[in-house]
Amino acid sequence: MDWNESTRRSFLKQFGAAGAMALAAAKAEGVGLPAAQTAAPGSSPTDLKQAATRQQRMQWWHDAKFGMFIHWGLYSVIGQHEWAKEFQGIPIPQYEILAKHFKPKPNAARDWARLAKKAGQKYMVMTTKHHEGFCNFDTKLTDYNAVKQGPGRDLVREYVEAARAEGLRVGFYYSLMDWHHPDGAKCATDEAARRRFVDYTHGLIRELLTNYGKIDVLWYDVAWPLDAKGWESEKMNQMVFELQPDIIVNNRNRLEGDFSTPEQHIQASEVGRAWETCMTLNDSWGFNRGDDAWKTPKVIVDNLATVAKGGGNYLLNIGPEPDGSIPPQTVAILEEVGQWLETNGKAFYGTERCNAGGNVNANYTRRGNTLYVHQKFWPGHTPAAEWLSFYQPEAVIAIGGLKPKVLSAKLLKTGQPLKFRQDEFSLQLTGLPVQAPDQPATVIEVECDGEPIVDHGAERPLWPRYKVGISI
């Protein structure tokens, strides 16, 4: 990635700390990290304690699969991406003026939570403090907060109450990196500054996890410029679990955490390691009025299947406008995704990691011995149908390398049973309508007599190869 890709890691690369940053990136991607149910060799007491309770704490999260990320802060007033301060080189005194002009409408978070529920999302994660250093919550540690500045009220409390009202789990995003605090950069080379800044950071996290009741997720971000020892991350997590024993935490404070966090791409961690892809709905996290690179519902639905196939979660971001309103494009896309999930959620929520290869036309998820085929490009009238179905116009779908034996197949949307035949090469589903029964993807439920495995290359050695080595 380069600077123009507008990701958090872009900032880290600008400082040239290649060794430390490579380690941070590896952790963020889940590379070489131990399985979630056991702690790594030499783990600290806190890591061991986390590992012992991880399965119980994370069960709801594994079932939920789909969450809403919310990036909202002073950068929303500018409306040119959440990194506007850095990209535009805005001095701190000038940037601070935005705090007086940040005046959201009452209870904007209610609309976010209602949309999340409509979209089929089961949890929410809001930016309590982004890199800009502005606290969206009531704090005694700085006046640079929503209560004492333009909003005049606790925006995090409104969010928490809105999420709970819709039955959604509550998560807090917290940026360790801070562009505003006077010790935010100096802490790397000045021990007195480090002590002040770490105490400040731990204090803010303590307030967040004390003042709002039960919190389900703590989502750390960007640990620059300190390592785990400098942040006292072990002590930090110990405090977090003392305050919120059932919480789950990510790995961006330079510790293992409960789950890995690939960003803007889907990359499954090794078997047993929990992971969550966070992704923007366009190309920006915060509100960016000029960013029209919206992902389509078809892309979102396919991403949901890809994430679930790898056993992960999908945290999809919205960037509310300065007053908290949701961009209309966001609403339209998420509502369509939610409508699809109303019918097809069985093929997504609570599914397990699926051993299935890639397919341009389809995706796969699994629950036990049931394979869900997410057909994103419908074949229409298949020429082969002429010899598979007595010349009746129909669509035919074939899945090469599917094992084991198939017992039944049906359209998930309608429950219509499907005809099929299976040989050593593939499963062929016949009698399908020429037009796709569902959009943006049609799901076919295939019951097998064992765990389904789709290996599209497995049939290659079985193909009869005629005239090989014969001159013609």
Image (tube, helix red, strand yellow):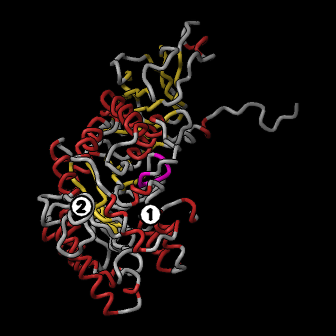
Image quarter in which the N terminus is found: bottom right
Is 192 situated above or below 356?
below
Q: Amino acid at mark 1?
A: Glu
Say left or right for 424 vs 468: left
Image quarter in which the C terminus is found: top right
Residue 410 image position (x, y, % from top left): 37, 21
Is residue 350 something one can see in this rendering? no
Is 117 situated above or below 20?
above
Say left or right for 111 vs 180: left
Viewer-closest of 427 and 147: 147
Residue 308 found in image quarter: top left
Residue 13 image position (x, y, % from top left): 53, 73
Q: Residues within 10 Å of mark 1 (few under 14, many from 20)?
A: many
Residue 252 image position (x, y, % from top left): 36, 68
Q: Residue furthest bottom?
A: 191
Residue beneath the point at 18% across and 58% down: 215
Residue beneath the point at 11% across and 59% down: 213
Q: Amino acid at mark 2?
A: Ile
Which tag, 2 or 1, sits closer to the chain's start? 1
Q: Which mark is on residue 248?
A: 2
* Main secondary structure found in the magenta portion: loop
Cα separation between marks 2 and 1: 18 Å
Viewer-closest of 452 and 125: 125
Disc 1 designates what residue? 29
State the SS at label 1. helix
Residue beneath the point at 52% across and 14% down: 434
State the SS at label 2. strand
Viewer-closest of 331 and 358: 331
Q: Tell me the magenta residue range.
A: 282-287
Say left or right for 104 vs 411: left
Viewer-closest of 56 and 172: 172
